[in-house]
């Protein structure tokens, strides 16, 4: 049975080249990269190679600016808590946006218990932060600005270069959560002008449970994990060498194939957006028409609820994601969608369609025809739909 | 996530639709917490001759509505008044904990529909209840943790039972 994966934002397939490199690494049974004997140095060398591949993918000034972590969540926690703790003497104020991932939101919530104050900026109807509002929010007490590069629910890309420029002028450290961007769209940390940038390996078809944090040379940040001197003293604990080798391979291929992959994704997205009105009506697109990821479309389908749609598509062997409250375990609709100005009912009907290098045009068409019948079925049951027909 | 009985009722919901000129209508829930249910009754000789539903909601909300209509169909008004949300959840052989209090509204809608029928019969007209925008309670005045279903105090910001932060929900 073939499942059509249109939920790449949750999981992407592991590249066969990365898988092979990891299996070879397991067979090889590397020693500890921190050990100074020959076996240790052999492991240190492959660790360095992976670091170089990753550094190249995002154009670091030197590979030393990369710290390997256990994934996007750890990177974000490291950046936010590490900067806050290292700079608390200067002040205890942080600027962020209303649409950040929970890794950011909850890290900041934790810092509030240590006396930090947080200014959270709203976004415009297109889901973007206004850089001028960042400038206005910064005070003498501000030690960090953290704004995501792209949003995991809507795919909207933020004006990071402009915000970084403002942060630099005001001498405030700037972190961007680029977990859904690195390896999908071109990312150049030097051109962006950020001080810290979080990313994850599985975004570019590497293994899960491994990621990294870019820390520009000279940025004041404490480690999140204290212990040994691994990762240039920035992240204690023996490295997950097998995962890192997989990520290194995936980074190498992401850089090599970035353009053809981008073209493929853009074509799929155009196809989906062009065909959508031929299959369903009365929906809202939450994805910015210009500044957005090429691999994600967020749509809110009126009068029906997202979990039901997801379950019915699952019956047709199509995997998608929904941002309805019912599916996420909380009783609230997505904070990101509400920030865009969506009503609760509309937010409940939100689907996130995300695809990848393994997705075909046939997959998109199969999804659309399945979606059409699911929407009809659920609208026939919906009291909101029949009420809307009466008025 | 859902058991076979729930999935069966979700995939093949029974008694979907509207009864024109229904003898009783009951509507519960709000889109804020994701679910809305409307129950329509046709009453004959103090018995539920026909029952239909419309639901906006997740898989369990649709399954609950369907199961409720099966339980209630053919019952006398007196027996139907005894149907509780718990009965519906049990007939479905269980619902996930976090769904027990947001999606399990079927019996509430039925009771409202019966009330509506009795009001009509007695010639009473009631204004449509106004929905609150914030912090809607579907079950009386009690609050429950959305993650583990433990009863909480109204102002709780943390669930000690499952260690969940509740600053924005419940």
Image (cartoon, rainbow, N blue to C red):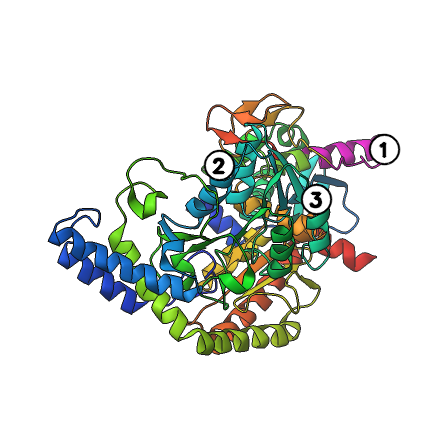
Residue A24 position by quadrant: bottom left
**Is B112 one of the magenta-colored residues?**
yes
Q: Earlier in the sequence, mark 2 or mark 3?
A: 2
Residue of label 1: B126
Other residues around mark 2 within 10 Å, as few (<14) / some (14–19) / many (≥20)? some
SS of the residue under disc 3? helix
| Distance from Cα at disc 1 to Cα at disc 2 | 62 Å
**Is B120 one of the magenta-colored residues?**
yes
The chain to which mark 2 is attached is: A
Name above or below for residue B43 compared with residue A131. above
Q: Position of residue A270 (x, y in %)?
A: 59, 76
Residue of label 2: A86
> Of residues A106 and A342, which is closer to you in this image?
A106
SS of the residue under disc 2? helix
Residue B145 position by quadrant: top right
Residue of label 3: A137
Q: Position of residue B91 (x, y in %)?
A: 49, 37
> Of residues A109 and A379, which is closer to you in this image?
A109
| Distance from Cα at disc 3 to Cα at disc 1 | 50 Å
Picture quarter with the N terminus of chain A: bottom left
Other residues around mark 1 within 10 Å, as few (<14) / some (14–19) / many (≥20)? few
- Let me know if marks 1 and 2 both belong to one chain: no
- From the viewer's perspective, tell me whether residue A251 is left or right of residue A366: left
Please give the range of residues in magenta: B111-133
SS of the residue under disc 1? loop
Q: Is residue B16 visible?
A: no
Badges 1 and 2: C-beta atoms under 8 Å apart? Answer: no
Other residues around mark 3 within 10 Å, as few (<14) / some (14–19) / many (≥20)? some
């Amino acid at each position: 049975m073939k499942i059509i994966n249109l939920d790449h934002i949750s999981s992407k397939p592991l590249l066969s080249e990365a898988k092979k490199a990891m299996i070879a690494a397991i067979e090889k049974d590397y020693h500890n990269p921190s050990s100074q004997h020959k076996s240790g140095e052999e492991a240190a060398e492959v660790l360095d190679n992976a670091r170089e591949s990753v550094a190249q993918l995002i154009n670091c000034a030197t590979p030393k600016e990369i710290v390997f972590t256990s994934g996007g969540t750890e990177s974000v926690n490291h950046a936010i808590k590490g900067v806050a703790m290292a700079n608390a003497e200067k002040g205890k104020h942080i600027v962020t946006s209303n649409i950040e991932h929970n890794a950011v939101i909850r890290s900041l919530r934790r810092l509030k218990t240590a006396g930090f104050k947080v200014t959270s900026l709203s976004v415009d109807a297109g889901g973007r932060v206004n850089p001028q509002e960042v400038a206005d929010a910064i005070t003498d007490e501000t030690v960090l600005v953290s704004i995501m590069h792209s949003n995991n629910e809507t795919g909207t890309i933020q004006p990071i270069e402009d915000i970084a420029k403002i942060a630099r002028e005001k001498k405030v450290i700037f972190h961007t959560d680029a977990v859904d961007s690195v390896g999908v769209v071109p990312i150049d940390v030097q051109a962006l002008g950020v001080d810290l940038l979080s990313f994850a390996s599985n975004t570019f078809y590497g293994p899960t449970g491994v990621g990294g944090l870019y820390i520009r040379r000279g940025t004041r940040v404490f480690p999140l994990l204290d212990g040994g001197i691994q990762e240039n003293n920035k992240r204690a604990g023996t490295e997950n060498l097998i995962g890192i080798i997989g990520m290194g391979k995936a980074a190498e291929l992401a850089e090599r194939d970035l353009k053809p992959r981008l073209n493929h994704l853009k074509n799929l997205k155009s196809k989906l957006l062009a065909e959508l009105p031929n299959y369903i009506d009365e929906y809202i697109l939450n994805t910015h028409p210009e500044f957005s990821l090429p691999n994600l479309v967020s749509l809110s389908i009126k009068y029906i609820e997202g979990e039901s749609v997801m379950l019915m598509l699952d019956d047709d062997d199509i995997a998608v994601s929904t941002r309805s409250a019912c599916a996420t375990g909380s009783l609230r609709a997505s904070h990101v969608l509400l920030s865009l100005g969506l009503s609760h009912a509309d937010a409940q009907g939100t689907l996130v369609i995300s695809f990848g290098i393994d997705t075909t045009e046939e997959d998109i068409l199969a999804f659309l025809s399945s979606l059409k019948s699911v929407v009809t079925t659920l609208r026939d049951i919906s009291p909101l739909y029949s009420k809307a027909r009466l008025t | 996530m859902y058991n076979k009985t729930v999935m069966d009722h979700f995939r093949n919901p029974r008694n979907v639709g509207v009864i024109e000129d229904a003898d009783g209508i009951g509507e519960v829930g709000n889109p804020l917490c994701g679910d809305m249910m409307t129950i329509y009754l046709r009453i004959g000789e103090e018995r539920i001759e026909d029952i239909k539903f419309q639901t906006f909601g997740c898989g369990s909300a649709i399954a609950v509505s369907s199961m409720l209509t099966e339980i209630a169909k053919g019952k006398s008004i007196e027996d139907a008044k005894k149907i509780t949300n718990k009965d519906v959840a049990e007939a479905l052989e269980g619902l996930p904990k976090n769904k027990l209090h947001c999606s399990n509204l079927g019996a509430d809608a039925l009771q409202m529909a019966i009330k509506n029928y009795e009001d009509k019969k007695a010639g009473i007209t009631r204004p449509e209840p106004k929905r609150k925008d914030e912090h809607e309670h579907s079950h009386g005045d009690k609050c429950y943790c959305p993650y583990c279903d433990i009863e909480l105090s109204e102002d709780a910001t943390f669930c000690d039972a499952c260690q969940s932060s509740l600053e924005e929900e419940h």
